[in-house]
Image: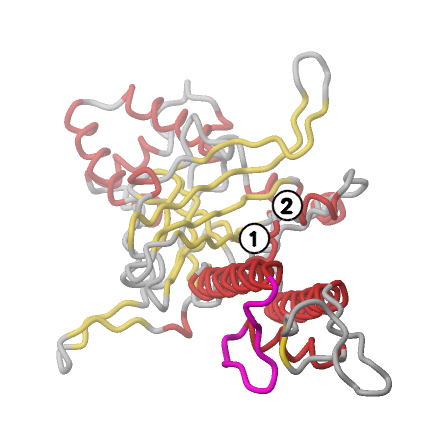
Amino acid sequence: MESRAASWKRTIDKLGERNVQFLNLPQRSLKFLKDLVNTLVEVQWRYTLAAFVLSFAVSWFFFAILWYLVAYAHGDLNFDPETGKRMGDGDLPCVAGATTFMEFLLFSIESQVSTGYGTWTPTEECAEALGLLTIQLIVGLVIDAAMVGIVYAKMVRPPKKISNMKFSKHAVICRRDGRLCFVFRICDTKHQHAIETKINVVMLQSHRSLEGEIIEKYERHMSLENNGRVLVFWPVTVCHVIDAQSPLYDLTPKDLLESKFEIVVTLSGGTNITGQVNEARTSYMPGEILWGHRFKNIVHYDKEHGRYVATNRDMNATELVNAPSCSARKLDEVAVNVKYFLSDDQHKEFEKMESLAEYHGQEDDSDSDDGILMKNMKGESFPFMDSSANKTLP
């Protein structure tokens, strides 16, 4: 049984990373270059900073070559070997004082970073030099603006891994208000999901269609209380009621050991600082679901300081509770049968005890009215009820 359950591989690991790799994508590198802005925002800082350093260096060298060619075309690099005078056109060179490539490179850097001119200065002699200077200044401003925008977007973007968002290590299946529920706990320690916090839960499982097609990772949505909207002011438990629409409706404790599926949990919400949406994910495998457990309460009110206190070290703490060893479907069938044969007074008492979800753990007092009702609920007074239903009652 363990080998069958272990054969299912995670799609999302416990830290929320996607365990998927795409191979043989055509022109994958070209696609990154076409979306260069998002690429620079998503990659690591060292690659982003290296890209900007390289862009500045390339622009400086590129315009230094253009300045050198302008001076060469104007004859500023030709000198009389006897007198040492410039033999170019006009009375002045395009760039006064620059005669070597290194000097043109320094002049290019001075022009683009606007540090001011010293030994090398442009003159009004060359119209092409003025045009080239204008173009270089515009290019420099574009690079500066791109760097500021991308660095800012990178600093305020939601982190890929939200370390402050914690999910419980295990999920549990227990009874709430008389119904089986799938429950897990979340805790947002830094309150980064304060706006429109919503949780989405999906079960991934192999599915065979009516035509015989095997669909791997078939998605089945699991509805949550309050449509998945929660307040994350403190550690909260998120509940999925296992009803007729639930993919867990036919699941029993024995099936849980043999089943192959994955329950993916996604939490999204905006921060109250930037308004950007953060997302955190995790998943639960069958071996990480505890049947007949519930989470311990870790939120208490501190009267001395007048505030609520959450014990973070008990985030994953659970306790054993009475729970039926049958599926939710079987439990509903037994409940329907019991309600059908009860009198009106017994029916009201049954609903009262069912809402407490503790009738199965009470003592069986044969002489009391409650004891008679307990026998009726267990099927002892109804010999015509299905025997298998009696066995599955807690």
Q: Which part of the image, by quadrant, shows the C terminus?
A: top left
Residue at position x 50%, y 75% in the image: 114
Left or right position of 124 against 278:
right
Left or right position of 256 against 322:
right
Vertical side of 340 occupied by 138: above or below = below
Callout 1 crowding tier (Cα within 10 Å): few <14, some 14–19, many ≥20: some
Q: Amino acid at mark 1?
A: Val
| Residue 169 in sight here | no
Residue 123 forms part of the magenta stretch: yes
Vertical side of 217 occupied by 64: above or below = below
- CB atoms at circles 2 and 1 under 8 Å apart? no
Badge 1 marks a residue whose secondary structure is helix
Q: Nearer the viewer, residue 46 or 111?
A: 111
| Magenta span: chief secondary structure | loop
Q: Amino acid at mark 2?
A: Leu
Q: Nearer the viewer, residue 9 or 170?
A: 9
Q: Position of residue 145 (x, y in %)?
A: 47, 61
Q: Which part of the image, by quadrant, shows the N terminus?
A: top right
Residue at position x 26%, y 73% in the image: 309
The magenta segment is 113-126
Residue at position x 36%, y 46% in the image: 198
Vertical side of 98 occupied by 9: above or below = above
Q: Identify the image quadrant of residue 13.
A: bottom right
Q: Nearer the viewer, residue 208 or 349?
A: 208
Q: Which residue is mark 1?
A: 37
Q: Which residue is mark 2?
A: 257
Mark with earlier residue (2, 1): 1
Residue 259 forms part of the magenta stretch: no
Badge 2 marks a residue whose secondary structure is helix
Callout 2 crowding tier (Cα within 10 Å): few <14, some 14–19, many ≥20: some
